[in-house]
Image (spheres, rainbow, N blue to C red):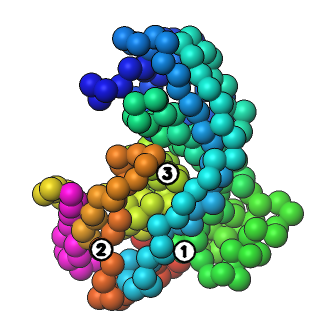
Amino acid sequence: MLQKNYSLVHANTGHSVLKTYLTTNDKLMVQTHGDSGSTLTLERFELDFMPASPPMSMRKPSVPRTLSPISTRSLTASDTLIFDNEGLYLLKTEKGFANGLLVLAGNYPQVTRAEELIPPLIYLTTSQEREELMQAKEPKAAVDNFWLSVGGSERQGRALIKEFYSRVERANKLYTAHKAGWATDRGMVYIIYGQPSSISQVGPNITWIYRESETAPYIKFVFTKKENNFTENYYELIRRREYEDSWYSTVAKWRAGKINL
């Protein structure tokens, strides 16, 4: 951070930007420190990252990708940044310091648009169900019908909707990296299992423990910090085959409307 000769502030308030995500409604300003003549570069990349795979998936991770920016612009002191397009942005200095920002539309991290309701359901639905939801002429009504069928009643369906999407929003707030928080490994586990009983960190590893209860057995998840050009907030789950029974059992409870709310 001592090498950083600039800061980002909100144009309207002057407050420092402390989050790693923004919306297309946000406007920022660049404030430089020290060498005011230095040039900053802002690059934008496409958002095409896949959601997390299930905890028991043993597929080998894909080869690290080389991303190419789809647009580049130079910045100077007091420039106002308006993010008209969604994307992954990287702000770089001549000294090599980089700062990543995920920019999404709507009221992110909240889920307020109909098209935002369907993607997180990947953890609960079959491929056919997702296809039907994606092709629905009225996506909001299709999502409501899905939860109504899961809950068995309007009251329980609404309760499940509230719980599921509140977890999505909290995952977005806490775990957003180069992709939305709900699509990360920690976001996936949090959405399905809820708040861990305990969290600990040793070195690059974060451990989540869910203690045994009347509705669920003891289970432990370990996440390892991964190098990422865009963020310091990206951790990958150490996947194990033995998670399979617990995962399918917990998903089944969601789909039976019996999740512990």
Q: Report if residue 120 is visible in the image.
A: no
Place of residue 141 in the rendered image (x, y in percent of width and height, measured from the top left): 76, 61
- Which of disc 1 and disc 2 is earlier in sequence? 1
Which amino acid, by three-letter code, is at mark 1? Leu
Picture layout, residue 69 above or below residue 223: above
10 vs 65, nearest the viewer: 65
Q: Quadrant of the C terminus?
A: bottom left
Query: Is residue 204 left or right of 185 when viewed as pictured?
Result: left
Q: Which mark is residue 178?
A: 3
- Residue farthest toward the right in the current orientation of the protein: 137
Place of residue 213 in the rendered image (x, y in percent of width and height, measured from the top left): 22, 73
Which amino acid, by three-letter code, is at mark 3? His
Task: Please check the rendered image and state whether residue 214 is part of the magenta-colored stretch, yes or no.
Answer: yes
Q: Which residues are magenta?
A: 204-220
Disc 1: which residue: 124
Query: Is residue 7 left or right of 256 when viewed as pictured?
Result: left
Q: Are marks 2 and 1 in contact (CB under 8 Å)?
A: no
Q: Say few, some or many: other residues with alpha carbon within 10 Å of mark 2 (under 14 / 14 to 19 / 20 or more).
A: some
Mark 3 and mark 2: Cα distance apart in space = 19 Å
For the point 38% across and 20% down, the residue is 5
Picture layout, residue 256 above or below residue 234: below
191 vs 81, nearest the viewer: 81
